[in-house]
Amino acid sequence: MNDVRLLIDFGSTFTKVVAVDLQKVEILAAARVPSTVETDITIALEQAIKEITAKTGVSNLNEKKSLACSSAAGGLRMVCIGFVPELTSKAANLAALGAGAKVVGLFSFKLTSREIDEIEKIAPDIILLSGGTDGGDEAVIIHNAGMLAKTSGKINNIIVAGNKTTYDAVKKAFDNSGKHVIFTKNVMPEIGVLDTAPCNKEIREIFLNNIIKAKGIARAQEITGEVIMPTPAAVLEAAKLCAEGVKGEGGYGELMVVDPGGATTDVHSIAKGIPTSAGIAMVNTLPEPYVKRTVEGNLGLKHNIDSLSEFTRIKKIPRNFDEICRSFHQGHLPQNPEEVACHLLLSRVAVEVAVTQHVGRLEKVYGPTGEMLIQYGKDLTGVKTVIGTGGPVIFSSNPREIMEGALFQPENPLVLKPRNPTLYLDEQYILYAVGLLAQTEPEKALLLAKKYLKPI
Amino acid sequence: MSKTPTIITGTVGMDVHVIGTKVISRALRESGFKVVELGMQVTPEEFISVAQETKADAILMSSLYGMAELDLKDFNQKRLEAGLNDILLYIGGNLVIGRYDPKEIEPKFKALGFDRVYPPGIDAEIGIEDLKKDLKARGKM
């Protein structure tokens, strides 16, 4: 009998299921059903599994062995708090993004009661509290712990990842607050050092043990295996696996994944990003993470089309541009040639801007020996693989045109985008599935990616 | 002195012009300070961690090669995060390339967190008198 594995993504709009034959490393069938998280998550799931059964003819699918990820019910919403914006706040932000979270608020310095009100209104799933290097500043994190302790029951899960010397005081501040407080290692233990892995692990644990239950996603586990991570984390896991490969099966090497969507455009890079030309100095307040995820919250093809269309105005825009943008915002999908052209242009701009924000840049300064170049962020000019995923690229008539927005532009030589990569398309929408499968069968997962990622 | 303040000295970044800091370190010791002499090519991060470790009261930096502004770009944020909001920061030397008016440079370095900014060739005694005055004002000597 074939070993068939179901890989499931509970999205906010669609519940996606893909059935993979592990022996042949082959997609047997895929199904996409409107999500039913608001009522009962299992309705859509059962329907999708029924579709899969009909398509494959396999009646005894082992649902319990399936793996699932979720971005339903708003995804994993986090607020990050640090001391200095460029340091611990940024470190906390990077840690949350790397765990697949949606960062819905970012705060620095001592919190005010007004900011606490704002945080209560946001009502995030998890708060990540950092501040101070180990042995460094104590006042800010202790103050902020005291402020958070006074919040209502809407604020529950708090991960503390700051100056470890303050932990006794922070613990005391939360005494009798009734909050679920987890202490882990500092995201920035010393100046210039980023340590997001322990924090990442705690975020996943809370997601697994608390959040999915609170959002009704855990009900799916009556049918399936565990919902193990947020969907963006699954995509990041897939990117990591594809870059690094496994023992005996090489990966693609350093790469970038670009994922434009309805609300945001995500960019992931698995690359060191060190300078590729001689004589360039790097200046980074914080080191750049090797596995880096950025999310452009104002670049979406549906929900954030207003800001996206503003970026597009510097280009030659088609007739009826504003009208068409409005219709996309209301959920209309492109049909006539004018709309298709408009959608293509918007997607291209989303990729262009998001990748420009993600990659590093060079700046000229004048020193004793004349002009010098200083690099901020990651140099990704040498990256040889760029993968496009997400509806706007996958369902486009011209994915290459969109993905070329990720490429180095000679007219902007100081922006360090990939110069000459091979562009791939995740045409079967399987990156999340690859990331899930990577947790148990990394080699099969890699082979699956290699089979279904198509050069364009 | 009732308390003996601890002072860190060194040249910042890739600068190797170490003589000035040697002179000032010696003058500081002769005036009764405890001096942690880091010598040349000290990174901003080293200044910060040594200050944390030694509970230093002031850092006296020197830079003669014109790159101080770039070397110290995020220094103020970093030292705050490291809990060094109360430390005195002095800098002196050729702080930018070429001839310049010290008055124009001073606000730039004040914005980077420095309490006092000196042009090149200043007498060590002047700096030490300022230091004593500032430390006394903060109740540190």
Image (cartoon, rainbow, N blue to C red):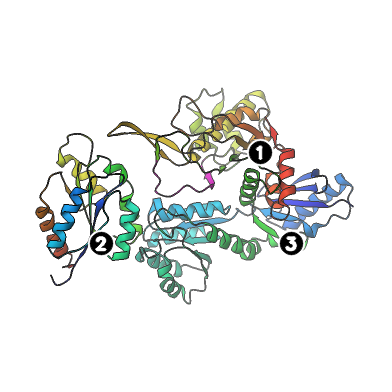
CA separation in Å, label 1 and label 2: 53 Å
Q: Give yes or no for contact between labels 3 and 2 (Cβ–Cβ under 8 Å).
A: no
Residue type for callout 3: Gln
Kindly state the secondary structure of the residue where label 2 is placed: loop
Nearer to us of marks 3 and 2 is: 2
Which of the chains bears the disc numbered 3? A
Q: Can residue A332 be seen in this view?
A: no
Badges 3 and 1, same chain: yes
- Drawn side of residue B47 relative to residue A14, left or right: left
The residue indicated by pointer 1 is A391
Kindly state the secondary structure of the residue where label 1 is placed: helix
Q: Give yes or no for contact between labels 1 and 2 (Cβ–Cβ under 8 Å).
A: no
Instruction: Compare residues A72 and A338 and report the one nearer the observer.
Output: A72
CA separation in Å, label 3 and label 2: 54 Å
Report crowding for label 3: few under 14, some 14 to 19, many 20 or more residues within 10 A (C-alpha).
Answer: some
Report crowding for label 1: few under 14, some 14 to 19, many 20 or more residues within 10 A (C-alpha).
Answer: some
The residue indicated by pointer 2 is B86
Q: Is residue A121 visible?
A: yes
Kindly state the secondary structure of the residue where label 3 is placed: helix
Badges 3 and 2, same chain: no
The residue indicated by pointer 3 is A221
Residue type for callout 2: Asp
Give the residues in magenta: A282-298
Where A128 sits versus A302, above or below?
below
CA separation in Å, label 3 and label 1: 27 Å
**Percent x, y for residue A213?**
65, 64
